[in-house]
Amino acid sequence: MTHSIELTRKLVDVCMGRKPADLVIRAGRWVCVQSGECVPDTDIAVIDGRIAYVGPDASHTITKDTIVLNADNKYLVPGLLDGHMHVESSMLTVTEFVRAVLPRGTTGLFIDPHEIANVFGLKGVRLMVDEAAKQPIHIWVQAPSCVPSAPGLETAGGEITPDDVAGALTWENVIGLGEMMNYPGVANADMKALSEMNATRQAGKVIGGHYASPDLGPAFHAYVAGGAEDDHEGTRLDDAIARVRQGMKAMLRYSSAWQDVAAQAPAVTELGLDPRRFILCTDDCHAETLVGEGHMDRVVRHAITQGIPPMTALQMATLNPAEHFGLSREIGQIAPGRWADILVVDDLQDFRPELVIARGRVVAEGGRLSMELPEVEHPEWARKSVHLKWPLKEKDFRIRAERDGRNVRVNVIGVIENQAPTRRLTFDVGLVDHEVKADRTRDLAKVAVVERHHGTGTVQVGLVTGFGLRERCAIASTVAHDCHHMIIVGTDEKDMVLASARLAEVGGGQVVVKDGEVIGLLELPIGGLMSNQNAERVAECAKTILEGFRACGCSINNPNMTLSLLALPVIPELRISDLGLVDVTRFESIPVVQAVAE
């Protein structure tokens, strides 16, 4: 609803008692994030989904038609906002994501749909924008900036140009530019990157950042000068400090796999940096995490365990993102004129909403949704996106070398548990029949990217360590950020063939094959990224994938999300794309077999 003069008059009339409120919450402790205090014995009066009155007594706004809720001295908290996230990473549709997180207290999302954009281009973004507009919570969309994320080093299913970005910025509910992942391009004055950022600036909207390099020298300063206004890729205390000092908002990420709050929280708790420059976000959250642990409520609880005071943590998840995106007149605080997005919470330390009000309506109670969500039908083109050139054979997953019976030195991707970066490692391995083989005794597996958008038949094979695969197995996924080709990690070529065939058959998803049998399967028919099932069902199927990883010997946290990032050539140090192995520190392709071992 537009904040019209008619609405303003209603708000004023309710405050003066000339018009009754639709809803009144009585006797709560107002968590006033704008002043940083908890105000006892507070009433809130709501009309047309907006807050009209916040004060000690709203009895003058009540008639027999007013819904009255007694807060019983519990805390009244603004609805939680996720400052940066990708719905597709949950493997849920927008609607099913809302179904999962709304009972947990999330009433606003800032989403970057660059995952589906890499599969379908701008029409994929439009699909997400249209579904977001139907939801009972606030969902703002950022126009994806880097599709593909690393031009020349990968091939996406779709492409988004600066003209596409400029056009999307005019759409309703598009709030700004999605994370600018091409940080080397910005530092080198790449015109595509600068044009997209300039279009956002001209539209008066926010430029999202993504600076994944540990280098805080001139390249970092050039990136900030280019216009990025926030960044969620910090993993160290120094990263948080540098971003805030340079005028950015430091987004502290706590996802299913990337957990960077603890390392950066001391910027606030020990060094005393202004906490209003910090925002909490999830970036990528798996359905199983949402169902089992929560969403932004989980992040708030975690931030508090890291020594951040509850009021400060709540500011980072409410008012701070609202102000950052220029929406503090609408959301992010309990104050007159704002949307009535209100949580009733018994304990701020162990933050778990008991009652959720969104846009002035009770939508969840006791962790359960109490309203119907819209039914959304996804078009056929969105459900048929896996195009492989068949048949794939065992030879497609072999790594050939010139020499036989000699050792060679190979470049290996080293995964880091709970972090997005990888390490560039080298192993000395022996050749067998002119081939580099997986070696389960050394935790050395094969990783392959199979092109799945255009059916070219391209297969790139490399090596990875850190998954701990001790069995004959293969795990495949069409969730492979950001280009979302099919990615497969395995110790056996036959199982890798079987895994790719099963995913082609179901239209995308994730699968685990062990000793020639499928032991885990998650079907993701929408873009090969999302299920049309609810979060509980997706979590159940995803559990079979995690159990499959464990059956293969893997014990790291959320290995499926770790696997999904191995093809993203914008995060150091080493990745593999459909064009080959990429050294992200230098943004250049390198061979798998480096040299003859000494």
Image (cartoon, rainbow, N blue to C red):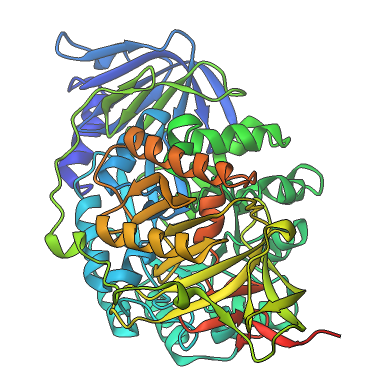
Front residue of 308/496: it is: 496
**Residue 496 versus residue 63 in the image, above or below:** below
- Is residue 384 visible in the rendered structure shown here? yes
The percent coordinates of residue 348 (x first, y second) are 58, 23
In depth, the one of 561 and 255 nearer the eye is 561
Residue 29: x percent and y percent?
50, 18
Give left or right: position of 114 versus 389: right
Residue at the image position 20 percent from the left and 22 percent from the top: 22
Question: Where does the image place residue 226, in percent across and percent down from the top left?
Answer: 55, 81
- Relative to residue 240, is residue 380 drawn left or right? left
Count numbered badges in the picture: 0
Please tell me which residue lies in front, 87 or 329. Answer: 87
Q: Position of residue 49 (x, y in %)?
A: 24, 33
Above or below, 424 against 54 in this view is: below
Q: In the picture provided, is 440 more to the left or to the right than 333?
A: right
Which residue lies at the image location 67% right of the left edge and 58% below the top edge? 440
Q: In which quadrant is the C terminus drawn?
A: bottom right
- The answer to whether 350 is drawn above or below residue 265 in the figure is above
Residue 81, by quadrant, is: top left
Q: Residue at left 75%, top 79%? A: 217
**Which residue extends farthest right?**
598
Where 177 sits versus 468, above or below? below
- The reply, left or right, for residue 261 in relation to residue 507 is right
Asked if residue 329 shows in the view, the reply is no
